[in-house]
Image (spheres, rainbow, N blue to C red):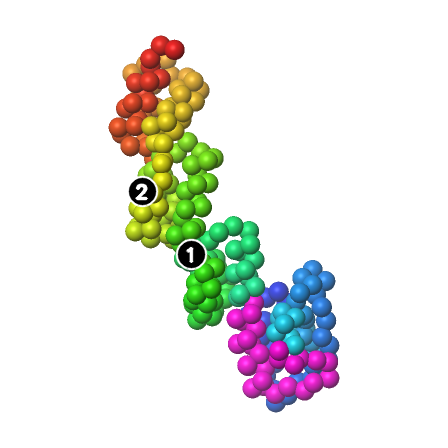
């Protein structure tokens, strides 16, 4: 079976023997900062440029099976970090969300734990800041209530304590946003019976995370003559 350059568990495909010859060291075309290592004429594994130099991997060098096992451990950590950095560069992630995504990619659990711990120490993973950014984003872009924001944050792996603190520190403008959502929904509803229309609107607004007090005020407001 040919070696797969982007397969995470690629080391298991390398036949076990006493020694190997590094037959080629090549920069990857699609990922310029990663190097492909060929052993005895076949692709074996890839790693970052920095780790390539650190491990002294060069064409013509002979390595033992024990050295290969060491490289495997270093490469797994290297690749896990690279993926974690790539995910964080796209948008903020909570600790739990990043951990789950790395697990889905097939990275070893112990390596993931080490990377999460390292990133936390470097303050690259701060759930408090992530929660605040998400709340700000939700408040800017959508007319949704506190309960729906809470559910979103919890799903992303933010703890209850951080969620409560973050929301308590924000002006959620619940009544205002509830009214805006109610006004837009009311105009689009085809129900002709006013009472049924109010009931449906109330269910919709509660489904958007608004409290019953805000929902009651919004229903009353959209019913008032303009």
Question: Residue 78 vs residue 215: left or right?
Answer: right
Q: Is residue 45 visible?
A: no
- What secondary structure is found at the residue carrying circle 1? loop
Q: Residue 55 lies in magenta, yes or no?
A: yes
Residues in magenta? Answer: 54-79
Identify the residue shown where x is 66% and y is 85%.
Answer: 20
Q: Residue 59 lies in magenta, yes or no?
A: yes
Position of residue 223 relative to residue 157, above or below, is: above
Q: Quadrant for the N terminus, please.
A: bottom right
Q: Residue furthest left?
A: 213
Q: Which residue is mark 1?
A: 126
Q: Nearer the viewer, residue 174 or 44?
A: 174
Identify the residue shown where x is 43% and y is 50%.
Answer: 130
Q: Position of residue 99 (x, y in %)?
A: 44, 60
Number of numbered discs visible in the structure rendering: 2
Q: Nearer the viewer, residue 189 or 29?
A: 29
Q: Position of residue 137 (x, y in %)?
A: 46, 40
Circle 2 Cα neighbour tier, 10 Å, few/some/many (<14 / 14–19 / ≥20): few
Circle 1 Cα neighbour tier, 10 Å, few/some/many (<14 / 14–19 / ≥20): some
State which tag comes first along the sequence, 1 or 2.
Answer: 1
Q: Residue furthest bottom?
A: 18
Q: Position of residue 7 (x, y in %)?
A: 59, 66
Q: Which residue is mark 2?
A: 168
């Amino acid at each position: 079976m040919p070696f797969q350059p982007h397969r995470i568990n690629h080391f298991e495909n390398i036949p076990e023997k006493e020694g190997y010859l590094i037959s080629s060291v090549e920069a990857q075309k699609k990922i310029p900062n990663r190097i492909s290592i060929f052993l005895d004429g076949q692709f074996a594994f890839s790693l970052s440029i920095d780790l390539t130099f650190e491990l002294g991997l060069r064409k013509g060098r002979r390595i033992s099976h024990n050295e290969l096992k060491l490289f495997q451990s270093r490469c797994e950590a290297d690749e896990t970090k690279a993926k974690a950095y790539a995910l964080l560069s796209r948008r903020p992630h909570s600790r739990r969300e990043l951990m789950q995504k790395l697990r889905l990619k097939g990275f070893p659990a112990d390596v993931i734990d080490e990377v999460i711990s390292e990133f936390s120490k470097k303050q690259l993973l701060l759930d408090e800041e992530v929660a605040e950014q998400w709340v700000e984003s939700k408040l800017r872009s959508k007319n949704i209530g506190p309960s729906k924001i809470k559910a979103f944050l919890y799903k992303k792996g933010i703890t209850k304590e951080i969620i409560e603190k973050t929301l308590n520190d924000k002006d959620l403008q619940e009544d205002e946003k509830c009214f805006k959502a109610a006004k837009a929904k009311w105009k689009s509803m085809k129900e002709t019976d006013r009472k049924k229309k109010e009931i449906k609107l109330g269910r919709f607004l509660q489904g958007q995370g608004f409290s019953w007090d805000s929902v009651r005020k919004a229903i009353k407001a959209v019913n008032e003559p303009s």
